[in-house]
Amino acid sequence: MKELVVTSPPTRGVAGGGRLGYAHVPLAMVRKRDAANQGGTRAPVLLIHGFGQNRYAWHLPSRSLVNYLARAGFDVFNLDLRGHGRSRHLGARRSRGVEDYVHEDLPSAVEEVRALSGDRPVWLVGHSLGGLVSYAAAPSLAGAVAGIASIGSPYHFTRGSFSLGAIALFLRALAMTRVRVPNAGIAVNSIGGVLRTVRRFAESPIYPLPLRGWHAGALEPHVLDEHLRLAFDKAGVAELTDMFQWASQKRFGGPERDYVERFEKLDLPLLVVAGANDDLAPPPSVRPAFDRSTTHDKTYRTMPLGHIDLLVGRDAPVLTWPLLGSWLGRRAA
């Protein structure tokens, strides 16, 4: 069973220091459930995509984690953050930074999911930046969140990547000049188009760029083509700047926010998954979320996959998906 959900204006403020009475931004979610399941769903699950992506990161025509979770009995909500996918078409313009996702988008989506799914606590599953947004938002949603699963989410962004570290140094030097960088749009979908054109070259040993997003040979050509065509979306300079600023401050969220302290004190089930072949979020950048969390129930796994491969790679259905499904199933029970 599939339906389009659009978030309603919030009826509750955001706890823990969020903005009360913020202007409503309509967000789109695709909800999927197994129509054959007459006994009700096991638990509501909210999927949060990463930087410059959209809901198709979780659901391709050829390979769909959404369908896998729905068949496993979960009530699955696949969110387009503001400025992405259907939410952009509804008028939700690009974010002014990651905090828009933390303080507005996730609380609004969680409230809508609970209203539609029996007011049950929601399981947050985030990929890449979506995992960081989940870390930051969950402490303010006490009682509304059941647990967090992050996949390829760099808690210490740029750690373990020389190339990303070099970009962070450049942006830090630029910031010292006090040059104001406008929040221009980034056409990530155009980058996807270029990668589709040069896919064979991008997977060859002579490809010069150390940042690709997938491990060579880990996705069948038609699946990679679908992902680059459908899941690559748009983004804003501000959210990218936020991530590199966190890297320069060597802490998720930076010193001006207590995201780190509040997340690390949070006592909710936590699953952290890293890709051993991930060139955007290598394990040294992902694992600190697990190491520093003080929750009584935490799990860490490393898969022999890349950033995109973790979700839709050839081996994802036998590695990442069953891990996530069984982890959710045991705790939802």
Image: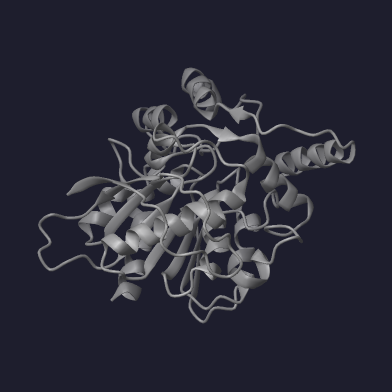
| Residue at far top of view | 197
Q: Is residue 200 above or below residue 170?
A: above
Residue at 78% x, 50% y: name it: 248
Residue 206 placement: quadrant = top right
Instruction: Work out whether residue 234 or residue 288 is closer to the camera in this orientation and state it.
Output: 234
129 with respect to 30 (left or right): right
Residue at 66% x, 34% y: name it: 183
Q: Residue 128: x percent and y percent?
A: 53, 49
Q: Residue 277: x percent and y percent?
A: 55, 46
Instruction: Work out whether residue 39 or residue 325 is closer to the camera in this orientation and state it.
Output: 39
Residue 35 placement: quadrant = bottom left
120 with respect to 310 (left or right): left
Res. 147 visible in picture: yes
Q: Residue 84: x percent and y percent?
A: 46, 37
Q: Residue 12: x percent and y percent?
A: 44, 65
| Residue at far right of view | 177
Q: Is residue 231 above or below residue 192?
A: below
